[in-house]
Image (cartoon, grey):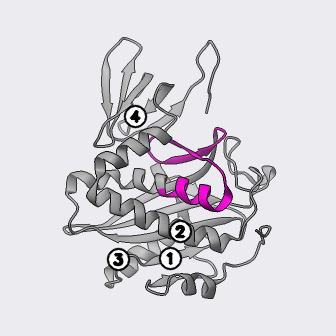
């Protein structure tokens, strides 16, 4: 293992490890997702990757900006052509990506990360990674899976107090190894997504800390649900029982883990 280096990614090393892929490694870019959406429109093959350690106009869910000091993070986007995948399964792809990040971080850094529904990756309650999946097309499904991973951020460089980084968790590795591991992990998890979604969702539940916690769910229409997360359904929806005992099925929303009055997890 080597320590982190605040330097550009070694494009040759990444390409040599995955010679069968179309891989673009810009020194910097506005958004790897935007770059790959453009390449998809130009006919780029499935499995194509755009990755960088400087992203100036990254976006997270709910259109939140995502930026970091140069060479401290990895911005990674992969193109997935999902012709054989039922449209009803497309919404699971952010969860698939979350599992792939958990796999890669454990493989390369030896850190056991966890998932917050639907696709935040946490370590010790701190957010390590955000994921944004965008569709270039739905007929047929052509999807871009974007991952923003906090690698070498110090405490005073964190974008929000509840974030963390691999450096702060005591990890030490080359960023290129993490990129390669993430690409392979995403390959494995997308095969599972295509062929055995039941097993995929069981593994997601095993890695997800949201179930059983008190949560605040901010819905896209501006409404909120306060209650307890009780289950994650096979189609990826979150089940929440509110404070009146009413059961809700949440397809999309911003979930916050809240600390109960008796104490416990807060994130």
- Residue depth check, mark 2 versus mark 3: number of the one nearer the observer: 3
Residue under label 3, please give it: 46
Disc 1: which residue: 50
Q: Between tags 4 and 2, which lies in front?
A: 2
Picture coordinates of residue 84 (x, y %)? 20, 66
- Read off the residue under disc 2: 76
Q: Residue at coordinates 63% horizontally, 71% vertically from top-left?
A: 177
Task: Kindly report the distance in space between the C-alpha atoms of the residues bearing marks 4 and 1.
Answer: 34 Å
Q: CA distance from mark 2 to mark 3?
A: 15 Å
Sequence-first tag of 2 and 1: 1
Q: Is residue 73 left or right of residue 36?
A: right
Q: Is residue 200 above or below residue 19?
A: above
Question: Mark 1 and mark 2 in contact (Cβ < 8 Å)?
Answer: yes
Q: Which residues are magenta?
A: 100-125
Q: Is residue 172 left or right of residue 195?
A: right
Query: Which is in the foreground here, disc 1 or disc 3?
Result: 3
Image x and y of residue 55, in percent: 60, 70
Earlier residue among tags 2 and 3: 3
Please tell me whether residue 111 belongs to the stretch shown in magenta.
Answer: yes
Please tell me whether residue 27 belongs to the stretch shown in magenta.
no
**Dot 1 crowding, Cα within 10 Å, few <14, some 14–19, many 20+:** many
Viewer-side label of 4, 1? 1
């Amino acid at each position: 293992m080597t320590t982190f280096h605040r330097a550009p990614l070694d494009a040759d090393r990444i390409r040599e490890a995955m010679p069968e892929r179309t891989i673009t490694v810009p020194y910097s870019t506005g958004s790897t997702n935007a770059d790959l959406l453009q390449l998809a429109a130009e006919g780029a093959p499935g499995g194509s990757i755009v990755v960088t350690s400087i992203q100036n106009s990254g976006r997270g869910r709910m259109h939140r900006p995502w930026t970091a000091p140069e060479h401290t993070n990895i911005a990674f986007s992969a193109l997935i052509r999902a012709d054989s995948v039922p449209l009803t399964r497309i919404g699971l792809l952010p969860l698939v990506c979350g599992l792939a990040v958990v796999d890669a971080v454990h493989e390369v850094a030896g850190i056991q990360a966890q998932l917050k529904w639907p696709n935040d990756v946490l370590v010790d309650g701190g957010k390590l990674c955000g994921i944004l999946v965008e569709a270039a097309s739905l007929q047929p499904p052509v999807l871009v899976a974007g991952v923003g991973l906090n690698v070498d951020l110090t405490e005073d460089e964190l974008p929000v107090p509840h974030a963390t980084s691999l450096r702060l968790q005591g990890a030490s590795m080359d960023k290129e190894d993490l990129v390669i591991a993430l690409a392979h992990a995403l390959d494995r998890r997308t095969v599972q997504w295509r062929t055995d979604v039941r097993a995929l969702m069981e593994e997601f539940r095993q890695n997800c800390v949201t179930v059983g916690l008190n949560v605040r769910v901010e819905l896209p229409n501006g409404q909120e649900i306060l209650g307890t997360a009780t289950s994650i359904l096979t189609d990826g929806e979150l089940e929440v029982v509110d404070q009146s005992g009413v059961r809700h099925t949440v397809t999309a929303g911003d979930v916050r883990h809240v600390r109960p009055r008796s104490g416990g997890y807060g994130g």
